[in-house]
């Protein structure tokens, strides 16, 4: 009887020790919000998972690194998962804290070879990806949705998301925002954010019961003018090569879209510029004949070395000279016009409302066009 009591007492002490080390109580609840990240680094850094093996003898077992020689039956695997520190706890106090916790725990489990996760709310990630003031920085948005109870919860992050090819591709060509939907409360919170961000159609897809078995998910979002398009879903059960092909296809699609948009924008700018040049040309009075006694000849030296000749009447204002320069593509906001005086004078510094005659303009003059 005494031996049984001592044995039971030792068992209770061992269980208490395990709970303290893991930072969770018997119900799987975190022992303190402040210890989420530190616990993830201290406890999970040494955790490894048997993703795939050719040894039939180990087909129904997985290793746990805190007891290297101990084999756990697969029926205990979900119990082990329930005691793990969550990627995102339900009692997070800010999005920044939640994402930091996700990153810390994710790296503890699967290593640092993963694309960077955007540290901010979903709406801010959408703005950063699609409405960045620097157009060159705009890129597709990838949502990584994790679920600890899914079949591929550990295989997909290790073999796909953390592979060198996919990680580098996502890092260079996409913006990645991550969230954990293991807890129902976090899942509902995500759906609320998606609805606020005009992603209600995506919420309806994710609510379909058949989607529950396909986590983790990589969802690639693009924006065509004002509407979102979820062009690509990469499911947790997919092989790395297939996931890589999908990501590359989406990258190529996005590249072609950007090229098309850039070409359309360039055509619009060219049309606008040509329309402006036509307007300026119509403002200019007809060029006087060379035999006209009031005609003066001005030679323009362009920045590329090209020479252009134009005659003006002495009765015209010097402003016509500047308008002519603009009509051949040299806007006054980007170029300066210098005469041949010693020292030279900038034409815009003169009273350009006066006529060539009033400013005693020479019969022949050289104007140098210089880019600002």
Image (cartoon, rainbow, N blue to C red):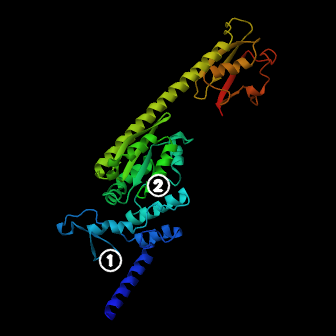
Q: Circle 2 sits on which residue? A: 117
Q: Circle 1 sits on which residue? A: 67
12 versus 294 height, above or below: below
Q: Quadrant of the C terminus?
A: top right
Q: Considering depth in this image, is 59 or 167 the residue closer to the camera?
A: 59
Q: Residues within 10 Å of mark 1 (few under 14, many from 20)?
A: few
- Residue farthest toward the bottom in the current orientation of the protein: 2
Disc on the earlier residue, 2 or 1: 1
Q: Gap between marks 2 and 1, in whole Å? A: 31 Å
Q: Residue at x 36, y 53 (%)?
A: 216
**Mark linked to residue 325:** none
Q: Considering depth in this image, is 59 or 186 the residue closer to the camera?
A: 186
- Residue farthest toward the left in the current orientation of the protein: 56
Q: Quadrant of residue 184?
A: bottom left
Foreground mark, 2 or 1, reads 1
Answer whether residue 139 is visible to the viewer in this image.
yes
């Amino acid at each position: 009887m005494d031996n049984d009591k001592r044995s039971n007492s030792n068992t209770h002490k061992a269980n208490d020790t395990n709970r303290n080390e893991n930072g969770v109580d018997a119900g799987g609840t975190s022992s303190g919000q402040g210890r989420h990240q530190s616990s993830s680094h201290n406890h999970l850094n040494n955790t490894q998972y048997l993703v795939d093996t050719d040894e039939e003898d180990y087909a129904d077992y997985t290793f746990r690194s805190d007891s290297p020689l101990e084999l756990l039956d697969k029926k205990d695997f979900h119990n082990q998962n329930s005691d793990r520190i969550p990627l995102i706890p339900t009692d997070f106090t800010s999005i920044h804290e939640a994402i930091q916790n996700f990153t810390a725990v994710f790296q503890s489990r699967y290593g640092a070879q993963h694309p960077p996760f955007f540290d901010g709310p979903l709406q801010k990630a959408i703005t950063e990806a699609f409405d960045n003031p620097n157009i060159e920085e705009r890129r597709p948005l990838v949502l990584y949705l994790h679920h600890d109870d899914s079949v591929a919860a550990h295989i997909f992050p290790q073999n796909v998301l953390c592979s060198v090819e996919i990680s580098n591709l996502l890092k260079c060509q996409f913006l990645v925002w991550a969230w954990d939907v293991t807890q129902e409360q976090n899942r509902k919170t995500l759906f609320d954010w998606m609805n606020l961000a005009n992603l209600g159609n995506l919420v309806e897809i994710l609510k379909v019961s058949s989607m529950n078995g396909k986590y983790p998910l990589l969802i690639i979002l693009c924006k065509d003018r004002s509407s979102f398009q979820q062009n690509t879903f990469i499911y947790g059960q997919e092989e790395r090569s297939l996931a890589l092909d999908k990501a590359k296809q989406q990258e190529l699609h996005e590249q072609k879209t950007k090229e098309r948009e850039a070409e359309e924008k360039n055509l619009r700018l060219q049309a606008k510029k040509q329309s402006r040049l036509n307007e300026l040309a119509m403002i200019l009075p007809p060029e006087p004949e060379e035999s006209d006694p009031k005609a003066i000849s001005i030679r323009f030296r362009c920045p590329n070395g090209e020479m252009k000749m134009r005659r003006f009447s002495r009765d015209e204002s010097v402003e016509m000279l500047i308008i002519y320069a603009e009509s051949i593509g040299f806007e006054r906001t980007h170029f300066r016009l210098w005469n041949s005086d010693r020292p030279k004078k900038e034409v815009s510094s003169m009273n350009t409302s006066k006529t060539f005659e009033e400013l005693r303009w020479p019969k022949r003059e050289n104007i140098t066009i210089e880019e600002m």
